[in-house]
Image (cartoon, rainbow, N blue to C red):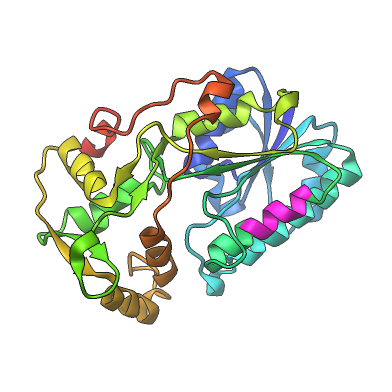
Amino acid sequence: MKVAFFGGTGFVGNYIVDELLQAGHEPHVLVRPQNASKLIQADKCAVYSGHIEKETVIQDMLVNADAVIYNIGLIRQFPKKGMTFEKLHFEGVRRTIKLAETARVKRFILMSANGAKMQGTFYQATKYLGEQLLKNSTLDWTIFRPSLIFGDPRGKIEFCTQLKKDMLSLPIPAPLFFNGIIPKNAGSFAFSPVHVNDVAKCFVSVLEKESAVGKTYEVGGARTVTWKEQIKTITSAYGKNKWSIPAPVFPVKMLAKLLDRFTWFPITADQLTMLMEGNTCSAKVFAEFEIEPIEFDKNSLQYLNK
């Protein structure tokens, strides 16, 4: 199957490319010129140099394609660099849907996010609007909404690795964030961490699965963990016993509002908002796709020792 793949150079994208190749598919991957070296198995893919704004490049990729995977996304936007949620989560999706319909490529798989909603952060809202565009199209669509994705980053940006670097490796206690002034529920917000290998398998398994057309799947791991438990699991994976203390999130969020326009500041105010909401969802997709999910534990986090 020829698959036009948008978003193949990032953390999750490279794993999806691996899975596509292993399943015998033919990935045709859009790569921005400055990211040419970020596609790990470029020699086994048909590589198209360009940007998601370039309709001619997208049209070339869609010629005789059997399916589209749209995995382009940002976890943080930098408008001065032209990297915005609106441009990539919404405008890029709209453009690719329109061209796929014109090229008569019916199958379209979209990477969204668990917690996508209209009345949320700008990240959540643009993810939600991208979903609505696809649902209102003429395409045979499937949408995936994963929770927190973990796994060996292989030189890319990954949550657990960044958490270790930006917070847990510092010579200060790990913060157990809480809202308000009373820390009775500090660090109790929870996640359903899902391994990147399992997410990639879902994307490839669904390509020829007719029963998945018109469905939105939440993708969470088998184990739900609180922020406090997550810190303990991550630090134990690389042999540390990190001390934690309750920390009100409000002053950190105020600081982030002042500084998150700078790339060196590790977190944005919106990311803190979403962190405090938690991010849990079901793992039942794996039973339907006959995948045994990798559990979030110190064994699956051994890459943090690198």
**Residue at the spot 72% in from the left edge and 61% down from the top edge:** 91
Picture coordinates of residue 101, whole percent (x, y): 87, 45
Relative to 189, say whether 43 is above or below.
above
- In screen coordinates, is 179 left or right of 9? left
26 magenta-colored: no
**Whole-percent x and y of residue 154?**
39, 38
- Residue extent of the magenta highlight: 128-135
Q: Is residue 113 above or below residue 144?
A: below
| 195 relative to 55, above or below | above
Q: Residue at x 90, y 46 (%)?
A: 102
Most frequent secondary structure within the magenta stretch? helix
Q: Quadrant of residue 301?
A: top left
Residue 295 position, x and y percent, is 34, 29
Give the x, y percent position of residue 180: 27, 74
Work out whether residue 12 or residue 225 is closer to the camera in this orientation and state it: 225
**Which quadrant holds the C terminus?**
top left
Vertically, is 211 above or below 221? above
